[in-house]
Amino acid sequence: MNDFIFQSPTRFVFGRGYTDRIGAEVAATGARKALVLYGGGSVERTGTLARVTASLDAAGVAHVEQGGIRPNPEVNQVRAAIETARSENADVILAVGGGSVIDAAKATAFGVPYDGDVWDFFAGTAAIEACLPIACVLTIPAAGSEGSGSCVISNDELNLKRGVNGDIFRPAVSVLDPELTFTLPPYQTAAGITDMIAHICERYFSGVGPVPVSDNICTGLIRAVMPAGTRAIEEPADYDARATIMWTSTLAHSDIAGCGRSLSPAARAGGWESHGLEHEISAHSPAVTHGAGLAVIMPAWMRYVWREDPARFLSFAKDVFDIEPVDDTEEAVADAVEATIDELQNYFASLGMPKTLDAFGAVPADVDAWIGTLEQNKGAEFGAFRRLTMDDARAIYLSAFA
Ligand code: NZQ
Ligand code: ZN
């Protein structure tokens, strides 16, 4: 087990109807005025936003609202939110939504105390040294941003989607109310489940291992969430299924599943190859849902790299799907690993996720543009399980078309 530093300072407030507690939770942080960020309108339609503002009123927390944060949030929306937070003297940023709104809230929170342009942090020309507190009411379990030390923002002008990592902007408090997710469209439910499984796999296949404690957390979370996902698609208002999915989202990306598997104690475990490859697709086409992109890219990445460490994939096969090779010949191992990747991909498809990039209207000619920005983001090589050159990345993308 490698050395690690694990910091998860967020207070998680989990339960039925707990949305109405957000005001008291925000007041308890000492904040006086919240900038409430939300997305394209789902929280207005469901009444969640009205509950949140009523709860803030009841707790004596002043507030100003700003909606319209899009999926794959854009830096100009963050710049606008920073202006609002400054002019309104907000001292807490409250996200009511999913990963996109929470990431916009995080970037706003560390953008407000900074004199320069917030994109500097994503360009790598400035380090985050100060940050307003962040609170969340999670409406879609997926990205894990409610507990993560990550923030991902797109820049349409540059065709870039970039993340920054740091414990300083982990949320102070996140309210997790599974009932809010009953209204999720099946596609978003499925994309969320795919994303959380990917967050676990990026850590499990980090090139460091085995680490029994973390391995069991990883495979146990996947075994818990898979049947819950199937159930939630069949019965959207099944509370226990929704609760299982919601808590898995948080644990999948809080870093608890990666402890002991990073290459330096303060670094996140894993090479994040599938995420790196997917982010180029949703950077160039913001209509692509991140989790849906992963449903296609991660199996393609697995098929390309598993020979680097077949034993690691066999552990995954046994512990998640109970698949074992019939003997120890190379052919039997290959059959078992390929069957495992098929099982995973078929599971995503059973929830309604696509199997090939064609589903997004992408064509092989798009790959050049993705490689161009991938190289800007990652350099000539990236990855931990197996180092990937840009030629490898191209081969993975091309293998993911029908
Ligand atoms: O915008 P509204 O109208 O609210 O609709 C949203 C949006 O269209 C809808 N939705 C959310 N809650 C709902 C609901 N519809 C009905 N009922 C509800 N209760 O769902 C759609 C997707 O929302 P979004 O926030 O975009 O989803 P997600 O949580 O998957 O976030 C995706 C973003 O997070 C980034 C992704 O790259 C992407 O930009 N990620 C962030 C990470 C992090 N900060 O740690 C890690 C991830 O790997 C990921 O990269
Ligand atoms: Zn993700």
Image (tube, rainbow, N blue to C red):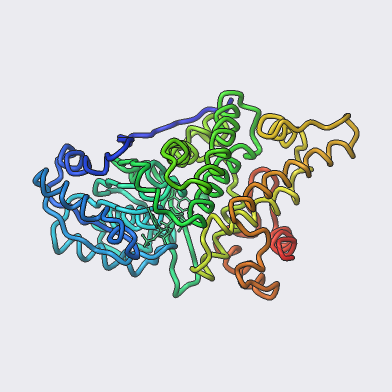
Between 332 and 159, the one nearer to me in the picture: 332
**Image coords of residue 64 (percent x, y):** 17, 59
Q: Quadrant of residue 154?
A: bottom left
Q: Residue at x 64, y 53 (%)?
A: 349
Q: Residue at x 42, y 60 (%)?
A: 153
The quadrant of the rendering that contains the C terminus is bottom right
**Image coords of residue 304 (percent x, y):** 75, 51
- 10 displayed left or right of 255: left
Q: Residue at x 21, y 55 (%)?
A: 50
Residue 245 versus residue 151 in the image, above or below: above
**Image coords of residue 287 (percent x, y):** 50, 68
Q: Residue at x 24, y 55 (%)?
A: 49
- 156 displayed left or right of 45: right
Between 22 and 42, the one nearer to me in the picture: 42
- 240 displayed left or right of 312: left
The quadrant of the rendering that contains the N terminus is top right
**Image coords of residue 377 (percent x, y):** 55, 61
Q: Residue furthest left?
A: 60
For the image, the number of numbered tags is 0
